[in-house]
């Protein structure tokens, strides 16, 4: 069976614990319902290709996308600053005492 979706249990500390895999979204939702009826909790369906949470509320998906964009931009800025700091800086002009 080729898995396209993973079902995770969301842990109180924000982590995730893998529960099962599914070939289709319909099967993943069915598995989630079965898990939730046996042990009510927060379960997440993750699309393996996009690595995004399929059943998250819209605000959570948007927040995740914005976080990824901010992370990429921050890394870009840090890399740019690091590159400019490692480039050879021009030598400071030498100041000499005035001669009489």
Image (cartoon, rainbow, N blue to C red):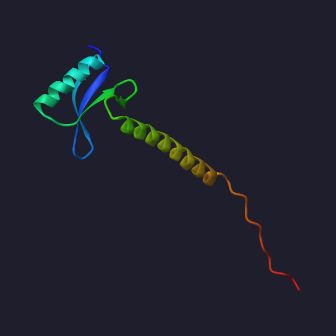
Name the residue: 40% across, 26% down: 50
Q: Name the quadrant containing residue 33.
A: top left
* Number of on-image labels: 0
Residue furthest out toward the left: 38
Q: Name the quadrant containing residue 19.
A: top left
Residue furthest out toward the front: 58
Left or right position of 100 against 76: right
Residue 100 vertical placement versus 14 (above, below) = below
Q: Position of residue 96 (x, y in %)?
A: 80, 76
Name the residue: 25% across, 22% down: 28
Q: Quadrant of the N terminus?
A: top left
Q: Position of residue 87 (x, y in %)?
A: 65, 51
Residue furthest out toward the bottom: 100
Residue furthest out toward the top: 1
Left or right position of 9 against 87: left
Q: Name the quadrant containing residue 27.
A: top left
Left or right position of 75 against 25: right
Q: Position of residue 62 (x, y in %)?
A: 42, 37
Name the residue: 30% across, 23% down: 5
Left or right position of 92 against 46: right
Residue 29 vertical placement versus 56 (above, below) = above
- Judging depth in this view, the residue of 62 and 13 nearest the camera is 62
Q: Quadrant of the C terminus?
A: bottom right
Q: Position of residue 73 (x, y in %)?
A: 53, 43
- Judging depth in this view, the residue of 43 and 51 nearest the camera is 43
């Amino acid at each position: 069976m080729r898995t396209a979706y993973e079902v995770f249990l969301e842990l109180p500390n924000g982590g995730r614990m893998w529960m099962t895999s599914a070939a289709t979204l319909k099967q993943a939702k069915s598995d989630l319902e079965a898990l939730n009826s046996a042990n009510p909790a927060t379960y997440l369906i993750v699309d393996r290709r996009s690595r995004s949470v399929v059943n998250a509320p819209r605000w959570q998906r948007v927040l995740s996308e914005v976080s990824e964009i901010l992370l990429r931009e921050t890394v870009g800025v840090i890399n740019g600053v690091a590159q400019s700091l490692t480039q050879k800086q021009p030598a400071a002009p030498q100041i000499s005492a005035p001669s009489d």
